[in-house]
Image: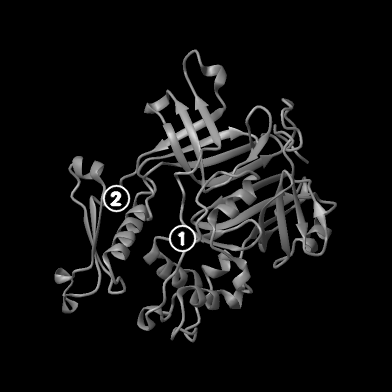
Amino acid sequence: MSRGPSSTNKSRGNSTRYLDTVYIESDTGGKFDIFNSLSIVNDYLAPSEAAFEVGDDGTWAELEDITGLGKKFKVFVNDRLRLTGRVELNDIPIDASQGAVTRFTVRTLMADAMYAAAMPNVKVKSTSIKDFIISLWLPLGIKESDFMFLADVSRDLMTGISSDGSHSPVELDKLNEEQAKVNPPETIFQATERHLQRHGLMIWDAPDGKVVIGYPDDKQRPIYTFRMFGDSRRNQNNILTMQRAKDWSGVPGFIYMAGTGGNKDWTKSKVRGFAYQQEVLNSGFYRPVIIVNEGLKNDKMAQMQADLEMANRIKRMDVWTVTVDGLSYWDGSDRIQYAFDTVAEVFSTAAGGPNGAYLVTRVQLNRNVGEGDTAELTLLKRGLWKLQ
């Protein structure tokens, strides 16, 4: 049961805005699109997931079997694939007057990678980081062909348009045997992330169930424009609510990254990287961070690691959360699907901004029978998340 405004991708130039659609398909061919409520989340930093409430007292028995634990589903928004996963959570709330409904949550295999232990017997001698990672993920059923080393391919698949982002595949160097060894109780995700961080790289979900290895691209062309004005321009507004968070808890003034050398005395290391947060320093916060990583072989790798550590610690330094109507962005003639790893331009007179380009780091699509469709986007100021 679809609610909330949207448009049709087939009507370029048509100003009519149609309803957004959501449906799910099981691997056995079943399909349904009537939901009491739903929430779909795509995030750089967490497995993609979709939570649904469906059915009523007369249908829960049938739905319980269809949506049982381990059942595989594909989730589509406006006929575009949003995520591929399996049921990991299932509960049935029962009300004396209204009976039972079925609630279930679909998560991607990234959730398993964040839980499952990495096997210590994975080959590390005479291999590459790429092959090492592929071997780590193989027990989950993720093969070499399931990895994507072009982040923009995944982004364009979700949004349905080209964002003119980076089109350069990532390159991974060879492993040092001692660096590579799995360190129990490392998970598959942790072992993977440990090696990717040396290159300023991240790992996240693609909508088709593949695994993306890349880096956030906040230099790409903005594809959304959000506005909230309190003056005569308020008729241009398309933001329902917005919230600003400036959380400096744990934000360092600078990071010193030391690599190899110095006869194990890091103070004499010739491999170094530095990352500064000038606004924190200027405000009088004394927060130096020193990290020693013997796996860093040159200044370039040390600098990328320092930048990544800083990026990981400033995610809440200046972030906006905006809530907008509908499950897709309406540009006046067509709809564009919301996705993270995209860039939005935001203009507002409220609370000192925001104004300018922001990286979309998280998207949550919500539907409720009584409240309609909304999308909540988390935005990080362009330039803050510097990974390479």
- The residue under the point 76% across, 37% down is 10
- Read off the residue under disc 2: 251
Q: Which residue is mark 1?
A: 202
Q: What is the count of numbered marks?
A: 2
Residue found 42% across the figure and 23% down from its top: 349
Crowd rating for badge 1 (residues with CA inside 10 Å; few <14, some 14–19, many 20+): many
Disc 2 packing (10 Å; few <14; some 14–19; many ≥20): many
Quadrant where the N terminus sits is: top right
Q: Nearer the viewer, mark 2 or mark 1?
A: 1
- Outermost residue to the top: 232
| Among numbered discs 2 and 1, the one appearing first in the sequence | 1
Secondary structure of the residue carrying tag 1 is strand
Residue 5 percent across, percent down from the top left: 70, 32
Q: Is residue 250 above or below residue 7?
A: below
User: Residue 208, relative to residue 324: is it above or below?
Assistant: below
Q: Looking at numbered disc 1 in the image, what kind of residue is underneath it?
A: Met
Q: Residue 382 lies in what quarter of the image?
A: top left
Q: How are the residues colored?
A: one colour
Q: Amino acid at mark 2?
A: Val
| Image spot of residue 308 (x, y percent) | 36, 57
Asked if 109 appears above or below 235 in the picture, the reply is below
Name the element at disc 2: loop
The residue sitting at the front extreme is 168
Residue 130 in sight in this render: yes
- Residue 254 placed where, x, y %? 23, 53
- In the picture provided, is 47 more to the left or to the right than 94? left
